[in-house]
Amino acid sequence: MASLSPEQVIEGQRQDWNRVAGGWEKWDRFFDEQMAFLNHRLVGDARLRAGLRVLDLGSGTGYPAILAAQVVGANGSVVGIDLAQQMLDAAGRKASALKLSNVTFRTGDVTTLPFESASFDAVTTRFCLMFLPDIPKAAAEIARILKPDTWMAAAVWSTPEKNPYLKIPIDIIKQFIELPPPDPAAPGIFRLAKPGELVAMLQQAGFIDISEHEFLGDVRFAEAGDYFSSLMDIAAPIQNLWAQLSPAQQTDAKQRIIHTAEQYRNGSAIALPIAVRMVTAHKPG
């Protein structure tokens, strides 16, 4: 089977993430609270402060663009960019509810950023870069639009075995259908999971003072059933695999996912481990 062109990959992702936009908005408060530690880490790593102009790549429903807007204040500004207009519509509603007038959202492709060179003071990006068909091109674009002597901060998923939160449903789906081994160079959840992979691409793009840190945490649910429901509402890549199961297989797989997740109960919550690769880089002055 012929591989998809970058344009086809991007269009497929646009459709996928628009499809789950309603689910992200439904779970917005929950994930805003659960991922607050990660959003704050990105804002800190990017050296955000009052008055800066910030670009957030792959904003989805506003993470961490809205936190960045609160940090840079009225004299600063944030632009959030994403493929999926319906995700950004949800982000815009959230910003309006918070009365934030210094953040705007627009659709666009991260590998061809529609901005002038040296026009931003910082870049943040959370769970975006690993889905891009041409990551080195995106790294070069980030370097182009950043002013000299500024910082970018990225979060991508670490390896599957350290991420039961994501690995559980994939492993269980594999019990019903045969999935081809993932192409290590193809866009996907764990595309940049290997240490040093994103670092090398940023070095090639001209960044210096690059640091990489595996950031451990967990996502907590009151019940394992809530975990399953959230997956089916927001996880577009897992939804695509789920659709390959028959209705009977889906019923069985759901029970197996819930049972496996229950094994991570910690007191009153299901605490599913996550491991995130945090990469920070400096554009030289």
Image (cartoon, rainbow, N blue to C red):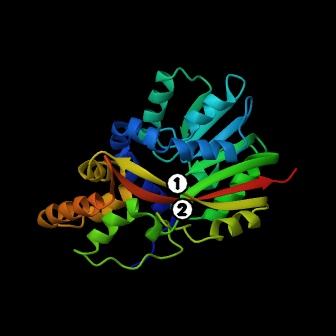
Residue lying at the far front of the rendered structure: 267
Contact check, label 1 and label 2, Cβ < 8 Å: yes
Residue annotated with mark 2: 130
Kind of residue at disc 2:
Met
Kind of residue at disc 1:
Phe
Position of the N terminus, as image quadrant, is bottom left
Is residue 169 found left or right of 36 in the rendered image? left
Residue toward you, 107 or 196: 196
Residue annotated with mark 1: 127
Above-or-below relation of 189 to 59: below
In terms of secondary structure, where does tag 2 sit? helix
Residue lying at the far top of the rendered structure: 99
Circle 2: is it few (<14), some (14-19), or many (20+) Cα within 10 Å?
A: many
Residue drawn at the location 45% of the way across and 28% of the way down: 93
Quarter occupied by residue 67: top right
Residue 173: x, y in percent?
27, 69
